[in-house]
């Protein structure tokens, strides 16, 4: 079966993003394999805590930061949305950077061995096996109850099938079984720092993974800036505060809006949209409207900025879980399983990920040691750990347990994990080779 395979050189075509030529691109099958140069990087992590709060520090070097995100552009009398999460980086650079941490206290069996790969499954959005949106919309749990149209991360423990190779997105356990899992802490805490959708408001997004990637309790720090009834943006910039009702398309592509500028729209700098204003071609209004969050959703504060060639970000949360149903409590002397991901002007699975790590609060045996301090965390200097992050391919939980995986027997034994059997010098190339091999088998 012949397919149209598009292999392109992106360098110089994405505003502000100096990317090398990707190794493979096939948009019909959700394929974008970054260059070897762009397929790995280093995320530096450090942590401190006191009697009340825990703070994790990130340092991520990049020459091409993005604090922009999706926008509405005025064209021929209509407002057209720009900014895509994939495949690969957005062609206009209109997608935010993001740094994420998955966190578990040992309640989720297998996460310590497989990390984020245990949450990736066949049929998930942005995979070649992506499920048709209509099937998800019609599903009683994901579509009718949650209002979703795609499949995202989930834990295999939430599906009814026992055989790990046969776990299916649509075979979700009943509400009673899910409630039992959640009450027992059988979910993964997910901290997502978003450069556009959360950081300007001073927060990171608090989520968790159970039968879906879910938002923690409370109001979000972002929502859609759109009026469905009027078919137009709901908000525009307040010209008395910002000097203009909109951004300029060319200035946006030239990355002229700095971190201190009004590149985002929020409840603090917006007024209701004026349809009678004389809008001009190329006027731009951000597609996300930012607001003050509440509850557990707003429990993680964020500070820092892009400075001296790197994102330098600090996230702070109470040691005690803000809500035991969606967050994990951290304790002095405790050790936790974590995994990290970095998105650079892209969304969905087009990110770089780490192997599973351990985070110890004054536990010297952990990969990342959080240091306890007395007093204000602002005065504490973390002990840094460099963590390699790399392109994760289309490796799924089903694949890891299948005969297609050379390490199937070791995975099934349940004793050893990815760090025991793989060397970081060879694993990234192995993952790329495996994705190519699996794609060839599908042809």
Image: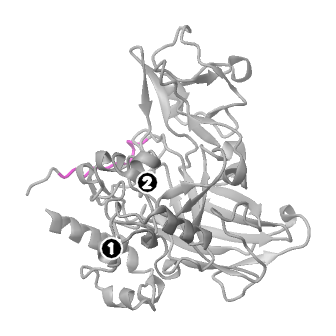
Give the farthest residue toward the left. Answer: 1
Left or right: residue 242 versus residue 165 is right
Could you tell which of marks 1 and 2 lies nearer the N-terminus? 2
Is 253 or 108 nearer to us in this picture? Answer: 108
Q: Is mark 2 on a helix, strand or loop?
A: loop
Q: How did the renderer colour the structure?
A: one colour
Looking at the picture, how far across and down is residue 384, in whole percent?
69, 73
Mark 1: give few (<14), some (14-19) or many (20+) Cα within 10 Å. Answer: many
Give the farthest residue toward the right. Answer: 375
Is 213 or 351 nearer to us in this picture? Answer: 213
Magenta segment: does it hold 10? yes
Mark 2: give few (<14), some (14-19) or many (20+) Cα within 10 Å. Answer: some
* Residue drawn where x is 48% and y is 18% of the image: 230
* Residue drawn where x is 43% and y is 31% of the image: 81
Quadrant into which the N terminus falls: bottom left
Return the mark for residue 348. Answer: 2
The residue pinned by badge 1 equals: 398
**Span shown in magenta:** 5-14
Query: Does residue 292 lie above or below 320 as drawn?
Result: above
Looking at the picture, how far across and down is residue 407, in whole percent?
33, 86
Q: Are marks 1 and 2 in contact (CB under 8 Å)?
A: no
Main SS, magenta region, reads loop
Looking at the picture, how far across and down is residue 169, in whole percent?
35, 62
Q: Of circles 1 and 2, which is in front?
A: 1
Quadrant into which the C terminus falls: bottom left
């Amino acid at each position: 079966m012949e397919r149209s395979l598009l292999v392109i050189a992106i360098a110089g075509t994405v505003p502000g993003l100096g990317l090398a030529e990707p190794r493979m691109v096939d948009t019909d099958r959700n394929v974008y394999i970054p260059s070897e140069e762009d397929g790995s990087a280093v995320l530096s992590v450090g942590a401190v805590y006191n009697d009340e709060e825990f703070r994790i520090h990130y340092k991520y070097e990049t020459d091409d930061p993005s604090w922009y995100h999706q926008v509405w552009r005025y064209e021929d009398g209509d407002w057209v949305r720009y900014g895509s999460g994939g495949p690969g980086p957005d062609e206009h650079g209109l997608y935010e950077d993001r740094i994420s941490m998955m966190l578990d206290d040992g309640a989720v069996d297998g996460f310590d061995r497989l990390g984020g790969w245990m949450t990736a499954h066949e049929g998930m959005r942005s995979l070649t096996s992506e499920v048709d949106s209509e099937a998800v919309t019609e599903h009683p749990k994901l579509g009718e109850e949650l209002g979703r149209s795609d499949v995202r991360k989930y834990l295999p423990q939430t599906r009814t099938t026992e055989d790990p190779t046969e776990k299916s997105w649509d075979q979700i356990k009943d509400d009673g079984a899910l409630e039992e899992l959640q009450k027992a802490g059988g979910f993964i805490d997910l901290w997502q720092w978003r450069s556009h959708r959360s950081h300007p408001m001073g927060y990171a997004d608090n989520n968790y993974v159970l039968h879906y990637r879910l938002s923690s309790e409370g109001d979000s720090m972002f929502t859609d800036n759109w009026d469905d009834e009027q078919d137009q943006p709901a908000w525009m910039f307040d010209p008395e505060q910002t000097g203009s009702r909109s951004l300029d398309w060319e200035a946006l592509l030239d990355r002229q809006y700095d971190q201190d500028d009004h590149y985002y729209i929020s409840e603090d700098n917006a007024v209701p949209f004026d349809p009678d204003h004389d809008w001009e071609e190329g006027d731009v209004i951000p597609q996300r409207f930012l607001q003050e969050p509440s509850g557990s959703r707003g429990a993680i504060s964020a500070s820092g900025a892009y400075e001296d060639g790197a994102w330098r970000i600090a996230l702070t949360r109470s040691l005690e879980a803000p809500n035991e149903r969606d967050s994990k409590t951290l304790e002095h002397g405790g050790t936790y399983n974590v995994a990290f991901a970095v998105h650079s002007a892209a969304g969905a699975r087009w990110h770089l990920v780490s192997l599973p790590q351990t985070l110890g609060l004054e536990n010297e045996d952990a990969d990342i040691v959080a240091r306890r301090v007395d007093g204000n965390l602002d005065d504490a200097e973390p002990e840094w750990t460099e963590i390699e992050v790399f392109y994760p391919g289309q490796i799924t939980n089903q694949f890891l347990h299948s005969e297609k995986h050379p390490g199937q027997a070791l995975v099934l034994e349940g004793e050893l994990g990815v760090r025991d059997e793989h060397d970081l010098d060879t694993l990234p190339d192995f993952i790329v080779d495996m994705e190519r091999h699996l794609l060839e088998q599908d042809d």
